Image (cartoon, grey):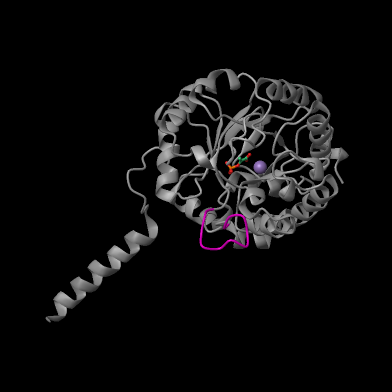
Amino acid sequence: MHRYDCQNLYMALHGWAMHEKESGVIKNIKLAARKPGQKTTIIDVNGIRVGEGLIIIAGPCSVETERQTIETAIAVKNAGAHMLRGGAFKPRTSPYAFQGLGLKGLKILDKARKETGLPVVTEVVDTRDVSWVGEYADVLQIGARNMQNFSLLREAGKSGKPILLKRGMYSTLEEWLNCAEYILAEGNPNVILCERGIRTFETYTRNTLDLSMIPAVKRESHLPILIDPSHGTGLLSFIEPMSLAAVAAGANGLEIEVHIDPASALSDKEQQLTVPMFESLMNKLRKLRAFMDEPEMSSALQENMDTPIEKSAAQKNDSQDPISPLPGAFSEAVD
Ligand code: PEP
Ligand code: MN
């Protein structure tokens, strides 16, 4: 081959490789795609800025009673959580398993919000329920089993509410981002992604928590990404190490199941943290984030974190709680 051709071939291959490495490989994504230099989108939920700092959503798998929900809400708030989770509509494998309290559960969540000030994240499972559930929820969760329920996605898009979109347990990143696209295409820019584990040949853990989705989502999309280590592992003692790993990898937040008395829980009793376990995890997360925010670490992690706004805020104010604090007296009550 002529030397000139070799050079051309090299340039062509090199250019192609560079192209593959640096630009999106996910097809058909328009609104969800991260454009070169684009920052992570911040989704404002009643003043809680998802996509900036580390956001912790915690609470029971299911809303069971007023006491259980409100006591859990107070406990997770005191430990530093930013939002309360709790299912009033439960998508269960068995039709005979507890299906959630429905409207009664939403009213309990409303009381818990009033009591604590925590915004409420709750799942919607039916297209017909989106608008009225949206009156009680601050964030509507679309669960793994409904990720590709396209009418539900469209309805969620029309609601304009912040949507927490879980990754389907059999879904690829491309399918997941296309589902986000359905919501965005309805004119709702408030989409938060949440990896919750996928089905693999491994049965030791409930699911295989795919933490590689953190850098993958950051490379392909500007939407914030949370990790749910509770459904992701299904094992109590795995939740802490996987939470720490997720934060080290640059997750924008975590969604964690916490119950005041897990043994009595009506769903997912084996994976719900007790309050002391959650408090201990929060203390470790706080220390990890403080370490990551140290100037040397912070610049080394620049690409992984991809939250320059957060970094400049942390640099401006050394005393800032490394886990984004709620405004007001609450942040002083922690630690
Ligand atoms: C949940 O978070 O309550 C839930 C049912 O999770 P997933 O949809 O990820 O299974
Ligand atoms: Mn659960």
Instruction: Pick the residue in front: 197 or 270.
Output: 270
Count of numbered circles on the image: 0
Main secondary-structure element of the magenta-colored stretch: loop
User: What residue is drawn where x is 81% and y is 52%?
Assistant: 283
| Spot occupied by residue 46 in the image (x, y as percentages of width and height) | 66, 27
**Residue 102, quarter of the rendered image:** top right
Residue 234 seen in render: yes
| Spot occupied by residue 168 in the image (x, y as percentages of width and height) | 49, 45
Which residue is the extreme one toward the front?
A: 96
| Range drawn in magenta | 198-208
Give the answer, above or below, for where 254 lies relative to 288: above
| Spot occupied by residue 240 in the image (x, y as percentages of width and height) | 73, 56
Question: In the shown orientation, is residue 58 left or right of residue 302?
Answer: right
Question: In the shown orientation, is residue 177 left or right of residue 105?
Answer: left
Quarter occupied by the N terminus: bottom left
Give the answer, above or below, for where 107 lies relative to 51: above
